[in-house]
Amino acid sequence: MQAQAMGVRDTVIDTKLDEAVVSAKRVRYSNRNNPAVELIRKAIARKDMNRIEANATYEYERYEKIMLSINNLSDSVRNGFLFRQFPFLAHYIDTSAQSLVAAGFFA
């Protein structure tokens, strides 16, 4: 692909603009004939029907996941307070070359 030279000439033109004044009467906002307002009104009217609790086929389970990353975990720590209070943590320990990772799910 060849490089192509292009010449551009720049000229300055000074022009004075006359003063322009823009004014308008203040128009009062109305909620009538506004489809967004109608949609919100319908949603508020059906609020009780649209709640999750009103739908018998919807189920969910809430949980929180906590992940602990511990380096150089000694036997005294493994037999200490944390593992005595939460014995299930011992079942979820993932040993890797660098650290021990324990993940727990709490309801």
Image (cartoon, helix red, strand yellow):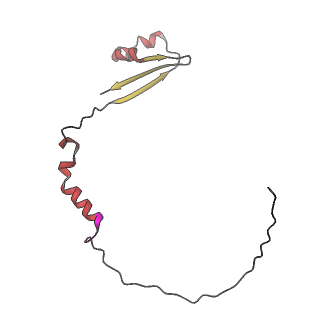
Residues 61 and 74: in front is: 61
Q: Residue at x 40, y 13 (%)?
A: 80
Which residues lie in the magenta part? Answer: 24-36
Looking at the image, the residue that sits furthest to the front is: 1
Q: Position of residue 70 (x, y in %)?
A: 49, 20
Q: Which quarter shows the N terminus?
A: bottom right
Q: Position of residue 13 (x, y in %)?
A: 70, 84
In the displayed structure image, the side of residue 31 where residue 20 appears, left or right: right
When asked about the image quadrant of residue 60, the answer is top left
When asked about the image quadrant of residue 79, the answer is top left
Q: Residue at x 33, y 79 (%)?
A: 27
Residues 37 and 102: in front is: 37
Q: Residue at x 23, y 43 (%)?
A: 52
28 part of magenta stretch: yes
In the displayed structure image, the side of residue 25 where residue 14 appears, left or right: right
Q: Which quarter shows the C terminus?
A: top left
Q: Position of residue 101 (x, y in %)?
A: 47, 21
Q: Tell me which secondary structure the magenta stretch mostly adopts.
A: loop
Q: Is residue 22 above or below residue 42?
A: below
In the displayed structure image, the side of residue 32 where residue 4 appears, left or right: right
In the displayed structure image, the side of residue 12 where residue 50 appears, left or right: left
Q: Is residue 78 above or below residue 68?
A: above
Q: Residue at x 21, y 48 (%)?
A: 50
Q: Is residue 97 above or below residue 45?
A: above
70 part of magenta stretch: no
Q: Position of residue 97 (x, y in %)?
A: 56, 16
